[in-house]
């Protein structure tokens, strides 16, 4: 399986990697759905929806501020670094991530499409003004904006559309790709998960220690963690 993937990556004119929270697990950040996952102990509709934010903006920001602080303390792991390296070893490489933790950028990946936004900025619900977030997020007394709107995290919540340009670029990359690597995602949240399945011609490889919604439909399954498998791929390609 690994041999075929390596051959495909070497020959590929274009490669897409789609990542999810599992790639940051070995940096100490929780995933969403597994044991200890964020959605096991937190209510999605309260914390990650426009309605939840309208009801209790301070609660929502307290949670994102905690996550922002955790992102700041975390470091990219060998999986993030391997994907940054893979970008230099393969042709036409695009990385589309569902993560908002900025760890791919911190690991040095250049072409990163953040499908669900990021926690580097807040934006106003009224006038769309933006401001950078500090290491521990947004002070709760700065949620209300002078224009009468509220500052919100610059991320995509449930029920919201993905940023159009980012989505189009990711979709194009999926259609162009000869190889699609799906890393650390349960592949149940759409439309992101669709990127793994839009191109019937692409060779799709899943890197995940556990089976997912798409395991039965991919060409190659590497059962292991991102920090184990991705460096092994990079090493084999560079030797
Ligand atoms: P999930 O929590 O749904 O899935 C995490 C996946 O990572 C699971 O399939 C795990 O088996 C796998 N995993 C765990 N440890 C791993 C490791 N060390 N290496 C590789 N894989 C590992 O998280 P996502 O698929 O990212 O959306 O969830 C998608 C979206 O749902 C998130 O972006 C977020 C969430 O609600 C929004 O907030 C809009």
Image (cartoon, grey):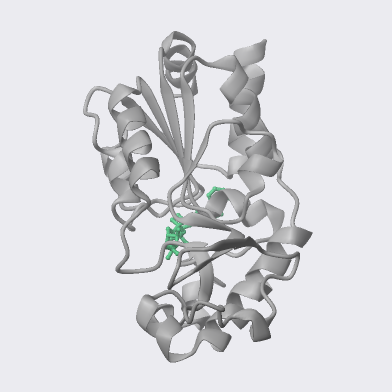
Residue 207 appears in view: no
Specify whether 177 is left or right of 23.
left
Residue 20 vs residue 216, the one in the foreground? 20
Q: Is residue 89 visible?
A: yes
User: Which of 179 and 46 lies nearest the eye of the viewer?
Assistant: 46
Q: Residue furthest bottom?
A: 55
Task: Locate residue 52 relative to residue 24 in the image: left or right.
Answer: left
Residue for point 69% across, 60% down = 71
Q: How many marks?
A: 0
Q: What is the x, y in percent for residue 175?
A: 28, 27
Provide residue 210's location: percent of width, then percent of height. 46, 52
Residue visible at 62% across and 42% down? Answer: 104
- Front residue of 92 and 153: 153
- Residue 97 appears at what percent x and percent y? 48, 45
Quadrant for residue 109, please give it. top right
Is residue 42 shown above or below 19?
A: below
| 124 displayed left or right of 195 | right
Q: Residue at x 52, y 53 (%)?
A: 99
Please identify the quadrant where the N terminus is shown.
Answer: top left
Image spot of residue 119 (x, y percent): 59, 60
Residue at 57% across, 48% down? 23
Please state if 3 lies on the left or on the right of 227 as rendered: left
Quadrant (top left/top right/bottom left/bottom right) for the C terminus: top right
In this view, 58 is above or below 136:
below
Q: Is residue 19 above or below residue 219?
A: below
């Amino acid at each position: 399986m690994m041999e075929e993937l390596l051959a495909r990556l070497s020959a590929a004119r274009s490669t897409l990697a789609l990542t999810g929270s599992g790639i940051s697990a070995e940096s100490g950040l929780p995933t969403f759905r597994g044991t200890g996952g964020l959605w096991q102990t937190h209510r999605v509709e309260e914390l990650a929806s426009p309605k939840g934010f309208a009801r209790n903006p301070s609660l929502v920001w307290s949670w994102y501020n905690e996550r922002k602080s955790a992102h700041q303390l975390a470091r990219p792991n060998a999986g993030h670094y391997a994907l940054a390296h893979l970008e230099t070893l393969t042709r036409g490489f695009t990385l589309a991530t569902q993560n908002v933790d900025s760890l791919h950028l911190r690991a040095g990946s250049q072409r990163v499409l953040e499908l669900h936004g990021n926690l580097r900025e807040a934006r106003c619900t009224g006038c769309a003004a933006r401001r950078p977030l500090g290491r521990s997020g947004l002070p709760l007394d700065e949620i209300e904006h002078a224009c009468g709107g509220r500052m919100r995290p610059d991320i995509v919540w449930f029920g919201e559309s993905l940023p159009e340009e980012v989505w189009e670029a990711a979709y194009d990359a999926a259609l162009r790709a000869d190889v699609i690597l799906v890393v650390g995602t349960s592949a149940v949240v759409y439309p992101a998960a669709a990127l793994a399945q839009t191109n019937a011609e692409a060779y799709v490889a899943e890197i995940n220690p556990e089976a997912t919604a798409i395991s039965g439909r991919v060409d190659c399954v590497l059962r292991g963690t991102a920090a184990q498998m991705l460096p092994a791929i990079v090493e084999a390609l560079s030797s």
